[in-house]
Every structure is written in structure tokens, then in C-alpha cells.
């Protein structure tokens, strides 16, 4: 690939490009880091232009799914785009993605044909880097391999004016390392979009210790012009959104690989149970398993913690070329919607009818009362007497408390399952059918049928702390608190990033505040005690909020 790029540049770029900067520019002193490497204010003549500049034309280098989406976003905002690709075939493919997206918008009535033509006319497919000589900003959107990025930045350095900002859309590689090799490191920033770029509203604007003052502000203004919301961060692997999202997705894949839950149940627990727009496994397929793997590897290299270690199945699927939607097959199969591979909901398909009589055991709380009344309304006879012969024992399960002791106490553990409501009992809301190591297959079937009769969406989960939705969520929330505790980002920026970058209806801190820090703490403590994994250890900042009984939104000092 690199050889190929190099030869393309030799043909179209290096040989034909006019170097546009003057000798005086070339002799300018390097600016940026001080001896101490601290991000101190930088002073220079030319850099100051970067801060105030107006962006009229950009170059987008790399027109894959993300690059084409980013080119579309610029063109829609009235900004001219010079589109660059590795060769003519790739350029045609990339322009094809852009055309398909615009045509879809016209079909859906969101664009007129005239607007489509106008937007399209702003995108100029280019034969070589020399055509990017006059752009105000160039953004690189190529695969996550440092050697390719280096070559591209060397070309951009060579052809672009020193006044131009050079941006990378890298998800996780070091922006600082890219900047350090540039002739003008002060103008290099991260401008990180989210997939699908035309839809997701977040742009992470990443400054390094070398970035000239004001450049991040200029790029943030540009992001606003594009209709996006910028969040400014410093250069750390994964920035905000990927550093939180990817470990959660990886954890979900680990649960699948270890047989903790089925593929369909994992995705249902996240969408119906937590309210996220996509399940983690479907989202991995959207992002690309190869991309997810490289982000995990970079984060593991940077932080060294087990939470960032790619689960072996992620590596195997990427090795196998099952990289997700773009390959037609990843965790799901996209080529053939009827493929047997896509039908693992069979585990929850109802083969038995809901039981007529049920023994309900609970803590005498609202949940138990709610379940009893819902069952009675559904025509099911409910008794609280375990000795009474019934078809099924249902234990109203609570997060953080195992079901098995109650099942044993009832004397018929093989006929007992837990039923855990992830939220309020309402039609379509999620019930986790909790199977202990003694629950019979018939009892699990009957429990699932019962939940379905109550109008609930069901998933099956083992009798482990957090069951399914909580297991996914608590560890994810702990990561968010740790990020804040580390002083990398505050709760508001974290919530904004996850809402606008990943479509969360509520950010992690809003979720913690809604559930109560104490309840998240209890869930994490149970997980940590059961598994002993350091990533489940509750962060002190969470424990402090729980002890003080204070919401993150109300905290005078939300991070330290
Ligand atoms: N390109 C352009 N537009 C798209 C699109 C695409 N690929 N996919 C969906 N859309 C548009 C649709 O046209 C639709 O717009 P209209 O309502 O105007 O017609 C809108 O988005 C909603 O789409 P749908 O109704 O088809 O589907 P949905 O409601 O399920 O939403 C979704 C789809 C926006 C992708 C939503 O599921 C979502 O927000 N998912 C989370 C995505 C996410 O987390 N992205 C971040 C991944 S991490 C990343 O990208 C960073 C990285 O470095 C790896």
C-alpha cells in the first residue's frame, strides 16, 4: 500500500506539484514545545494567521466511508473540497459513496436535485497532491497506519501553504507524533469525526503540546460552521469517545465469546435495556472490527491496562477479514439477511406457553408488587408460597444480589429463575431472565414465556453481578468516572461526546445521576468482588459522590 501511495505521489504529486511556500517561510524557526515539553503559549508571526483564518477550501485525503462522509459535510456547508485518493479507481469509489449518499437524501426529500448538484459541484476529484496547494485546511482520513499517515503529512507539508492547517481524523494514533515530524508542527491538529459522519454531530478537536494557540479554536469554529459540536481535548489515545466506547464494545464481544449471553441478547440489552441507539455488536460491525482492533491496540499500548486488551475474538474476526458491514460480514452477516448466522434469537424463541401458576418470591418491595399485579392482569395465578405446587418459581431479582440463595431457600431451585427488570415494568421494556446454575432449561423457557406474556422484551443472563445490561453498563460508567478522575475531561464534555458522537440519549454522567452514584457503586462492588478484575474496581470519585449523596451535575468539583 505504501509503495503504491508513493508511486502515485511520484506520478501525480511530487513530480507535478509546485512548492508554494517561499524561502522566508522555509527559514522560519520551528515553534511549539519548550525545552520542558510543556504546552506554554507559543508566539510567532505566521502562526497567528492560523488562528484567525477563514476556511474556504479544504483537501480531504482518503475517500473511504469516513472520508466521503467528511467531504460531504464540508461541501454541504458551502466549502470547496479537493478530494484525493490513492488511485483513480479508489477516487471513483469514494466519489460513488458521496453520490449515493446525496442521491439518498434527494430520494428522501431532504435535498432538491438543484441542491444536490450544487453540493456535488463543490467537490473536485484531484489527480495529485499538487491540487491541494491552495487549500486552507487538509484533513487526512486514511487507514490507521502511522507509516501511511507520515507519508501523507510529508506530502501535505510539501505542497500546502504554511498557513494551511493540517488535520488528522485519526481515532487513536498520536497526533503529537504526526505533528512532531511536520515542518510546521504548530498547525497540526486532530479533527475527529464520527461514523456516519453526515449524521453524528461531534467533532473532537485535538491539540498537542506543539499546537499553536488559536488553531484549535479555528478548527472548532469550522466544526460549528459544519453544524457540528466541537469538544476540545488534548492528545491521549482514544480521546474521549473512543476511549470510553471501544472498551465497552470489546467487553460485549468478550461476553459473546465466553458464552455469557447470545449476540441478539447482548444487543437487545444495550438498546432496550440501556436505551442506546445500537447494540455494541452491531456497532462494532459499523465501525469495522479492524478499526476497532487497531484502536484497542493503541490504547492498550498507551495505558497498559487489561480493560484495553483486545478480546481474542476481535483479533480473529479481523484476521479472517470479517471486518463488519464494509466487508458484508462481521459479527453479523450483511450479505444474506436470511443467513442462519443471523438467527441466534432462537434461544429466546418461545417453544413453551407461559405457565398458569407461578410462585413469586421477592423482597416485598414495589418491584415485587408490580410483577404480581402484572401477572394477575395477564391471567396468571400467583402465589407467594414456595411449598404450593406451581409450574415456575420467579424470584424478583435485584441488581447486585444473586438469585441462587432465594432459589435454594424455595426448595425447588431447578424450577426457579430470576426476573430482573432493567427499568420500569412497561410494555416493551426489558426483562432479564436470570438462570442460576441449577435452573432447568424448562424453567428458563417458562420464565421467558412468562415475561413475553407480560409484554416485556426478554434476554437471558447468568446469575452474575449486573446480569447482562448492568455488566455492560457499570464497567462503562466506571471508565467515564475514571476519565474524569484523571482530569482528562469533565462530566459535561464526556456527556456531550457520548451523546453527539455515539447517539447516546443520555451521557454516562447523566446515567449515573439518574440511577444514583450509590447504586452504580453497589453494582461495581459486586462485580469487582465476584471477578476480581481491576477494571471493575469502583473509582474513588464514584465512591465519594455516593458517600456525599451528590449528583455529578451538582458537584462543585466534578473531577480531580
Ligand atoms: N450516512 C448518511 N446518513 C445516514 C447513514 C449513513 N451511513 N445512516 C443513517 N443515516 C441517516 C438516515 O438517512 C436518517 O436520516 P433521515 O431521518 O433524515 O432520513 C438518520 O441518519 C437516521 O437513520 P435511520 O433512521 O436509518 O436509523 P437510526 O435511527 O437507527 O439511526 C444511526 C442510525 C444514526 C447510525 C444511529 O443508530 C446511531 O446514532 N448509532 C450510533 C452510531 C455511533 O455510535 N457512531 C460512532 C461510532 S465510533 C466512531 O465513529 C469513531 C471512531 O473513530 C471509530
Image (spheres, grey):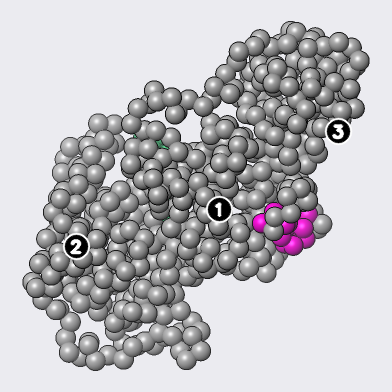
Measuring from the top left, give residue 448's x and y in whole percent.
66, 20
Name the residue rendered at 49%, 85% in the picture. 37
Residue at x-position 52% and y-position 54%:
310
Name the disc covering residue 4, or none: 2
Q: Earlier in the sequence, mark 1 or mark 3?
A: 1
For discs 1 and 2, the disc positioned in front in the rendered view: 2
Q: Quadrant of residue 175?
A: bottom left
Q: Is disc 1 in contact with disc 2, using a CB cutoff of under 8 Å?
A: no
The residue labelled by disc 1 is 247
Label 1 or label 3, whichever lies nearer to me, is 3
> Which SS class for mark 3?
helix
Instruction: Classify the position of the C terminus by image quarter.
Output: bottom right
Is 544 left, or right, of 226 in this rendering?
right
The CA distance from mark 1 to mark 3 is: 32 Å
What's the magenta region?
535-546
- Identify the element where label 1 is drawn: helix
Left or right of residue 71: residue 133: left
Q: Where does residue 303 sit, x and y in percent of width and height?
A: 57, 67
Tag 3 residue: 405
Question: Residue, x 16% and y 71% (percent of image)?
Answer: 133
- Looking at the image, can residue 498 be seen? no
67 w.r.t. 359: above or below = below
Ligand 1's quadrant: top left
Other residues around mark 2 within 10 Å, as few (<14) / some (14–19) / many (≥20): few
Q: Nearer the viewer, residue 184 or 399?
A: 399
In 3D space, how far apart are the residues under numbered discs 1 and 2 (Cα atoms)? 34 Å
Amino acid at each position: 500500500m505504501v509503495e503504491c501511495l508513493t508511486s502515485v505521489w511520484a506520478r501525480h504529486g511530487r513530480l507535478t506539484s509546485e512548492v508554494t511556500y517561499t524561502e522566508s517561510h522555509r527559514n522560519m524557526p520551528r515553534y511549539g514545545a519548550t525545552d520542558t515539553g510543556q504546552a506554554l503559549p507559543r508566539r510567532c508571526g505566521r502562526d497567528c494567521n492560523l488562528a484567525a483564518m477563514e476556511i474556504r477550501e479544504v483537501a480531504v485525503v482518503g475517500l473511504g466511508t469516513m472520508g466521503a462522509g467528511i467531504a460531504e459535510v464540508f461541501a454541504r456547508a458551502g466549502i470547496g473540497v479537493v478530494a484525493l485518493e490513492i488511485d483513480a479507481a479508489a477516487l471513483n469509489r469514494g466519489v460513488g459513496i458521496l453520490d449515493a449518499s446525496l442521491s439518498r437524501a434527494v430520494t428522501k426529500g431532504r435535498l432538491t436535485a438543484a441542491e444536490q448538484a450544487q453540493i456535488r459541484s463543490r467537490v473536485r476529484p484531484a489527480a495529485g497532491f499538487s491540487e491541494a496547494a491552495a487549500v486552507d485546511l487538509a484533513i487526512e482520513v486514511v487507514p490507521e497506519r502511522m507509516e501511511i499517515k507520515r507519508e501523507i503529512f510529508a506530502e501535505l507539508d510539501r505542497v500546502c501553504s504554511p498557513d494551511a492547517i493540517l488535520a488528522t481524523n485519526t481515532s487513536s494514533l498520536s497526533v503529537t507524533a504526526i505533528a512532531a515530524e511536520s515542518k510546521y508542527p504548530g498547525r497540526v491538529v486532530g479533527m475527529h469525526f464520527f461514523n456516519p459522519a453526515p449524521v453524528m454531530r461531534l467533532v473532537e478537536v485535538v491539540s498537542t503540546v506543539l499546537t499553536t494557540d488559536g488553531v484549535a479554536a479555528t478548527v472548532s469554529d469550522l466544526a460549528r460552521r459544519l453544524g457540528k459540536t466541537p469538544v476540545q481535548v488534548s492528545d491521549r489515545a482514544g480521546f474521549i469517545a473512543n476511549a470510553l466506547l471501544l472498551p465497552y464494545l470489546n467487553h460485549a464481544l468478550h461476553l459473546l465469546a465466553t458464552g455469557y449471553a447470545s449476540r441478539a441478547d447482548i444487543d437487545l440489552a444495550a438498546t432496550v435495556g440501556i436505551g442506546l441507539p445500537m447494540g455494541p455488536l452491531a456497532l462494532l460491525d459499523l465501525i469495522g472490527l479492524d478499526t476497532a482492533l487497531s484502536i484497542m491496540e493503541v490504547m492498550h499500548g498507551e495505558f497498559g491496562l487489561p480493560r484495553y486488551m483486545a478480546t481474542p475474538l476481535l483479533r480473529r474476526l479481523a484476521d479472517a477479514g470479517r471486518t463488519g458491514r464494509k466487508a458484508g460480514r462481521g459479527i453479523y452477516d450483511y450479505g444474506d439477511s436470511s443467513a442462519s448466522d443471523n438467527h441466534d434469537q432462537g434461544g429466546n424463541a418461545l417453544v413453551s406457553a407461559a405457565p398458569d401458576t407461578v410462585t413469586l418470591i421477592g423482597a416485598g418491595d414495589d418491584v415485587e408488587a408490580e410483577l404480581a399485579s402484572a401477572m394477575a392482569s395477564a391471567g396468571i395465578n400467583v402465589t407467594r408460597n414456595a411449598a404450593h405446587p406451581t409450574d415456575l418459581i420467579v424470584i424478583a431479582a435485584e441488581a447486585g444480589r444473586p438469585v441462587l440463595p432465594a432459589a435454594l431457600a424455595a426448595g425447588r431451585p431447578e424450577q426457579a429463575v430470576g426476573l430482573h427488570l432493567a427499568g420500569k415494568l412497561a410494555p416493551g421494556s426489558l426483562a432479564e431472565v436470570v438462570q442460576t446454575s441449577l435452573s432447568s432449561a424448562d424453567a428458563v423457557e417458562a420464565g421467558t414465556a412468562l415475561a413475553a406474556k407480560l409484554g416485556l422484551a426478554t434476554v437471558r443472563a447468568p446469575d452474575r453481578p449486573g446480569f447482562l445490561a448492568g455488566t455492560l453498563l457499570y464497567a462503562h460508567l466506571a471508565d467515564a468516572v475514571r476519565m474524569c478522575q484523571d482530569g482528562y475531561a469533565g462530566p459535561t464534555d464526556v456527556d456531550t461526546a457520548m451523546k453527539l458522537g455515539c447517539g447516546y440519549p443520555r451521557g454516562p454522567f447523566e446515567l449515573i445521576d439518574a440511577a444514583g452514584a450509590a447504586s452504580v457503586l453497589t453494582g461495581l462492588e459486586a462485580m469487582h468482588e465476584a471477578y476480581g478484575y481491576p477494571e471493575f474496581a469502583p473509582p474513588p470519585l464514584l465512591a465519594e459522590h455516593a458517600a456525599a449523596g451528590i449528583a455529578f451535575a451538582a458537584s462543585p468539583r466534578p473531577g480531580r
